[in-house]
Image (cartoon, helix red, strand yellow):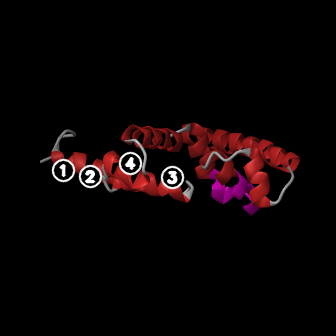
Amino acid sequence: MSLSVKSPAVRQKRIACDEAVLAGRAELLDRADRDLLLAVWVHRGSAELMAHLAGRHPETIRRRVRRLLERIQSPSFLSAARALSLLPARQAEIARLHFCQKRSLRQIARHCALSLHEVRRQVHEIRGALAGIDAFRREAKAG
């Protein structure tokens, strides 16, 4: 007997898988974003409760969670997340900060004690590396 795609057991399994994937991706976010996303999306906390605890309006929390979900599903986030282990340590840190946490180049320069020019140069190199890795993955998938 096979289970229907719409059966509760299959739906529950898919939700658990999605939550595991979401939790894994959330690890690349900064602490505040990760905690909020996990509390609302994975642990099923209400936006109203989180808003009350943070002293914010519930719609502000909902909008922030929606933006975080869009970010962790964006092509640039996914590309960087897949490539972090393939990049040198310094570039992996810059990629995580820039593509996953959406930090500005100036913030990255301060955080990594680099010049703004060096951060720009590194981000340019990282974009090239990510494009090459993505092209290789597409080719391997097709062939």
Q: Is residue 90 above or below residue 82?
A: below
Dot placed on the residue nearer the N-terminal end, 1 or 4: 1
In contact (CB < 8 Å): disc 1 and disc 2: yes
Dot placed on the residue nearer the N-terminal end, 3 or 1: 1
Residue at the disc numbered 4: 51
Image point 78% across, 56% down: which residue?
A: 110
Residue at the disc numbered 1: 9
- Find the distance from the CA under tag 4 to the CA under tag 2: 30 Å
Residue occupying the far bottom of the picture: 89
* Mark 4 crowdedness (10 Å alpha carbons): few <14, some 14-19, many ≥20: some
Q: Is residue 100 above or below residue 90?
A: above
- Find the distance from the CA under tag 1 to the CA under tag 4: 32 Å
Residue 33: image tag? 3
* Mark 2 crowdedness (10 Å alpha carbons): few <14, some 14-19, many ≥20: few
Task: Report x, y in % for residue 61.
Answer: 42, 43
Of marks 3 and 2, the one in the foreground: 3
Residue 13: image tag? 2
Task: Report x, y in % for residue 132.
Answer: 71, 42
- Local secondary structure at mark 4: helix
In contact (CB < 8 Å): disc 3 and disc 2: no
- Find the distance from the CA under tag 4 to the CA under tag 3: 14 Å
Image point 67% across, 47% down: which residue?
A: 103
Of marks 1 and 4, the one in the foreground: 4
Prevalent SS, magenta region:
helix
Question: Which amino acid type corresponds to the residue marked 1 in the rendered image?
Answer: Ala
Q: Nearer the viewer, residue 109 or 15?
A: 109
- Local secondary structure at mark 3: helix
Of marks 4 and 2, the one in the foreground: 4
- The magenta stretch is 83-94
Question: Which amino acid type corresponds to the residue marked 2 in the rendered image?
Answer: Lys
In contact (CB < 8 Å): disc 4 and disc 2: no
